[in-house]
Image: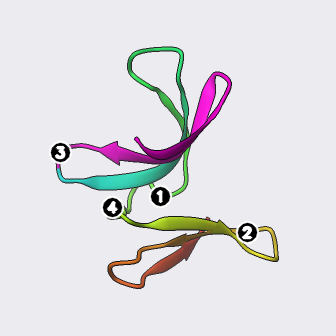
Amino acid sequence: MSGAHHLGEFAFGFQRIGSDGGFILAIWFTKNPENTVVWSANGNNLWQQGSTVELTAHAQLMLNDTATGKQKDC
């Protein structure tokens, strides 16, 4: 997990998936050892370390891949 914000029993942030180093933006349950993901914005498109998420002026979540310049709204 990278840059996670803990919200009681849940956390929000980028979570590493698999061994290839990719991340998803997710909310996961923290009260079990598996950290079960309950929501993700980009499960089919992994993002690289250093990616960011921002809340825009129009209340949208925007994913930014700093390595490639790729963006995606959630």
Give the amino acid type for the residue marked by disc 3 in the picture.
Ser
Q: Are marks 2 and 1 in contact (CB under 8 Å)?
A: no
Task: Give the mark nearer the N terminus: 4 vs 1.
Answer: 1
The rendered magenta stretch, by its main secondary structure, is classed as strand
User: Residues under labels 2 and 3: Cα distance?
Assistant: 30 Å
User: Neighbour class for label 1 at 10 Å: few (<14), some, many (≥20)?
Assistant: some
Q: Are marks 2 and 4 in contact (CB under 8 Å)?
A: no
Name the colouring of the figure: rainbow
Name of the residue lying farthest toward the left: 19
User: Neighbour class for label 2 at 10 Å: few (<14), some, many (≥20)?
Assistant: few
Q: Is residue 6 left or right of residue 30?
A: right
Task: Give the mark nearer the N terminus: 2 vs 1.
Answer: 1
- Magenta residues, as a range? 1-19
Q: Residue at x 82, y 75 (%)?
A: 58
Which residue in the structure is indicated by mark 4?
49
Q: Residue at x 50, y 66 (%)?
A: 52
User: Neighbour class for label 4 at 10 Å: few (<14), some, many (≥20)?
Assistant: some
Mark whose residue sits in front, 1 or 3: 3
For mark 2, give the secondary structure.
loop
Task: Give the mark nearer the N terminus: 1 vs 3.
Answer: 3
User: Residues under labels 2 and 1: Cα distance?
Assistant: 14 Å
Which residue in the structure is indicated by mark 1?
42
User: Residues under labels 1 and 3: Cα distance?
Assistant: 17 Å
Which residue in the structure is indicated by mark 3?
19
Image disc number at residue 60 = 2
For mark 4, give the secondary structure.
loop
Q: Quadrant of residue 62?
A: bottom right
Image quarter (top left, top right, bottom left or bottom right) of the C terminus: bottom right
